[in-house]
Amino acid sequence: MRDSDADIVRELFEVIEDRKETLPEDSYTASLFTHEKGENAVLEKLGEETTELVLAAKDDDREEIAHEAADIVYHMLVLLSMKEMDVEDLLDELETRR
């Protein structure tokens, strides 16, 4: 992973952490932290986005593949935040897989 790629992931995670802390009313991210289903709301979104990614791949729709993959990364980062993990936990694990 290039440093700039990791920086993008870190920046997104920082935004997610900020939304978790400040809970702006108009924030989708904040709504995931306050959802009545709790963590299950994010887990359901991960399942939904994964299915959408598989279908996009089946259709060989490169634009949709990128879109759905980004949705999965975003919701995965929200889940890491919910579990009181840090983006560095993810990046460290990816580093071991080089």
Image (cartoon, grey):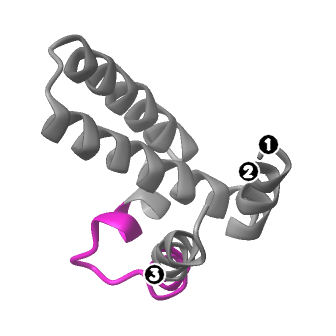
What is the secondary structure assignment of the residue under circle 1?
loop
Q: Are marks 1 and 2 in contact (CB under 8 Å)?
A: yes
Place of residue 9 in the rendered image (x, y in percent of width and height, measured from the top left): 52, 69
User: Amino acid type of disc 2?
Assistant: Leu
Q: CA distance from mark 1 to mark 2?
A: 5 Å
Residue stretch rendered in magenta on the structure: 15-31
**Residue sitting at the far top:** 58
Q: Earlier in the sequence, mark 2 or mark 3?
A: 3
Q: Main secondary structure of the magenta part?
A: helix
Quadrant the N terminus occupies = bottom right
Task: Name the residue that disc number 1 marks.
Answer: 97
Mark 2 or mark 3, whichever is nearer to me: 2
Task: Name the residue that disc number 2 marks.
Answer: 94
Q: Which quarter of the picture shows residue 63?
A: top left
- Judging depth in this view, the residue of 12 and 39 nearest the camera is 12
User: Amino acid type of disc 3?
Assistant: Val
What crowding class fits label 3: few (fewer than 14 Cα within 10 Å), some (14-19), or many (20 or more)? few
What is the secondary structure assignment of the residue under circle 3?
helix
Mark 3 or mark 1, whichever is nearer to me: 1
Say if the magenta span includes residue 88. Answer: no
User: Amino acid type of disc 1?
Assistant: Arg
Question: For the point 50% across and 85% down, which residue is it?
Answer: 18
Question: For the point 42% across and 80% down, which residue is it?
Answer: 23
Question: For the point 56% across and 45% down, which residue is it?
Answer: 39
Task: Name the residue that disc number 3 marks.
Answer: 15
**Rendered view: 57 above or below 85:** above
**Residue sitting at the far right:** 96
**Rendered view: 28 above or below 25:** above
The disc at residue 56 is: none
Q: CA distance from mark 3 to mark 1?
A: 26 Å
What crowding class fits label 2: few (fewer than 14 Cα within 10 Å), some (14-19), or many (20 or more)? few
In the image, 50: left or right of 40?
left
